[in-house]
Image (tube, rainbow, N blue to C red):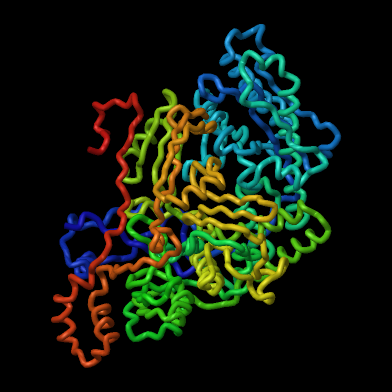
Amino acid sequence: MVKAVFIRIYYESKEKLIPKSIELPNINIEDILNVIDSEIDSGKLPDVKSLISVKSRTPIKVTTIKGVRPECYPFIVADLETILVNNVHVPYAAGYLVVKSSDDLTSKPSIHTFFSEDHIPFYHTFEERSERILHDFFYNLEVSVLNIYSTSLRTIYFHNFSRFDGIIILRYFADRHKYKIRTLFRNHKLYELKIYLGDKLLFRFRDSCTLLPSSLATLGKTLCPELGSKGSIPHEDLKVSNLQVSREELINYLRQDILLLGGVMLKAQEVNWSKYHIDIEEVMTLSSLSLKIFRMHYLDDKTFPIHIPTQNQDTFIRRAYYGGHVDVYKPYGENLYYYDVNSLYPYIMKSYPMPCGVPVWRNNLESVELDSLFGFIEAYVVCPTNISRPFLHYKDQYGTLIFPTGKFIGVFYSEELKFARDLGYEIIPLRVYLFEKKSSPFESFISHLYESRLDAKKRGDEAMTFIYKILMNSLYGRFGMNPESTVTENCDQKRYEELMKKDIFQSAEKLTDHYYIVNYITNFCGSDDDWKPPRMSDVQLSAAITACARIHMYPHISRPDCYYTDTDSIVLGSPLPEDQISSSELGKFKLEHQVNRGIFLEPKSCMLEIEDERHIIKHKGPAKDLVTSEWFVRQLADLSQTENIPTDANFRIDWKRLQIVKKELILNLGLPRSTKRENIYDSNNVWIDTRPKEVIDLGTKDATTIFKYELLRNNDESVSKATIDEGQETLQPTLYNTKPKKAKKAKSKRLPKDHDNSSSHKPDE
């Protein structure tokens, strides 16, 4: 039985919309019943009290924008220094510096510092002294600084705030009930922490690493060498007992870190303001800064409208969005050549057409030619076994991206499928989101930044060379941000209980009597929450860019003498032709190293012995700092060997207590067998080569289409539809010999330790 009827009314124009109230049209209930073919409870529609126009949070396309600030805002840079007490990092010093756009930081600026051991006469324990300097630090910020600068000074930067300082600061304010705190967490990374007194925003803490992703030592050397280099102190030797005698050294170290951070951020602010009239204080991440520059100065949204996908569109297209091709082909080689592409993704963004406009859905593509399609296609593909370096990707049941032979269904960019067809793949399109094909909207953006970077390089201007490079490489990823992410929210008990009842809830910890910290999934597939993707999320652009990058790399990856590839780099047994090499031309290769000896154990794990017996070692995972060139040699000789190595993780986050702790770990230093390709061994059982895996995964939705295709590709074109329908039942069990896809593991709802289990809200059984 129908309990209610909702009527949505559309207006031809904004002028015809009455914002406060509107009378319902004369609607006949019988007409409604005829349409819905059901019974309705009650013969009256409810009264409509008001209809108010609310602007949607999510825009429908990316638009051009204009700058609004008349000048750059001042900001604050700050730092905390800690010491280990019972394996927990506890602050012993803090400091800050106010930075204005007109400041000359070479002339000894006023840096305010707070040192725990200055309070020894008044507090007997180190924990009390640490608490006191944090109180003085934040009180000084609140009273002495923010009241002077009014609303123009609100942002405080820490370097590595997200994974270190921010956790300590969040813990501090969670215990102060007079403040309200609001956090912006995504995937366990703290992007911003806002502190309110009542409804008044006091300050917001941000991470300078999200704008300038590099170490402070490197940034200082690159952007403001005139301020000196980053200092060093023997952190491992510091104890509470020797803090006082090291006071001068420790305070000078803190001051230099703050000075360098101030110089780095000031330089970045000056450059972006002078070049683009954008204040970096307006944005939170490098990708959002790059997007703002693009929208203000380069985007023509009339010529190239960039549509923001709906949930259905995003979900479908995102199945085609993968990163670079990473594979091991040969495990060992000598006298090799290691090449990198000059700015691979920027080159693709400049040179290749891009999907434009509003996508159009089409189904039943059996009789449609592949060349007539441009967009993102779900297709049945067959890769012949004679292709030793397959091109199209497939995600296996473990979530690993592999490049197999065989038969499988997936969603691909249309240009990938056309390229694969020309390599010998057989392609059957099934359904598609069609786009308009247009010249790239990024052409002028990339051209100007790359030319500016080359000019800066010629002038020896390392600061500008660095800034142009990071801006140019950051834009594409912003469009591909995944709407589904883990959100960590600090909230009161009422909000906590609301979240805990929802399917999106993951876990919770009780911080204080007033605050809980709750993890949940936003835009979770299948949840009834509203679709709230990141603003300006346009996955079709990122998917097209990464797909075309794989096309660009494939002729070099497919060479028989390719030993290893990682997104934009290749290791070859013989040199590339001269016309493909340039140290400055966008999209061409540059020779990084001639390699005396190379060992390639698995994707993201390789060792290159280069000139002067130096080594380049790459190894993904927690053991990356423990592997050596000797370990690679031993591991290649015996792939099964493992060893347990004790090590310390000095900066682990304890989310239950919001602390940074030192934790002793035992790492299993071994080589998990790669599932991307199969190893080939010689007669002595020595690993010498690899071959692609074969996949048979034909889905479950397109049996008739695939069955008909399988008969036709075996030259049985006389088969009638009746024969197909009849024969399908006999063929289907073998045709659908599918590997099970890895399902998302349902996470049990973990509640705070002191949660009242007598409540109706209990963990899932």
Residue 503 appears in view: yes
Instruction: Give the position of the C terminus as an image quadrant.
Output: top left
Task: Say which of 725 and 157 sits in front.
Answer: 725
Residue depicted at 49% across the width and 66% down the height: 543
Residue depicted at 56% across the width and 23% down the height: 84
Whole-percent x and y of residue 375? 46, 74
Task: Say which of 420 and 175 sits in front.
Answer: 420
Query: Relative to 319, is 712 above or below?
Result: below
Residue depicted at 45% across the width and 27% down the height: 657
Instruction: Give the position of the N terminus as an image quadrant.
Output: bottom left
Residue 311 appears in view: no
Q: Is residue 486 left or right of residue 476?
A: left
Whole-percent x and y of residue 187? 47, 45
Query: Relative to 438, is 633 above or below?
Result: above
Q: Residue 408, located in which quarter of the rendered image?
A: bottom left
Residue lying farthest to the right in this orientation: 107
Query: Relative to 531, is 183 above or below?
Result: above
Task: Say which of 146 and 640 sits in front.
Answer: 640
Whole-percent x and y of residue 568? 58, 63
Task: Say which of 297 and 600 sits in front.
Answer: 600
Q: Is residue 678 left or right of residue 469?
A: left
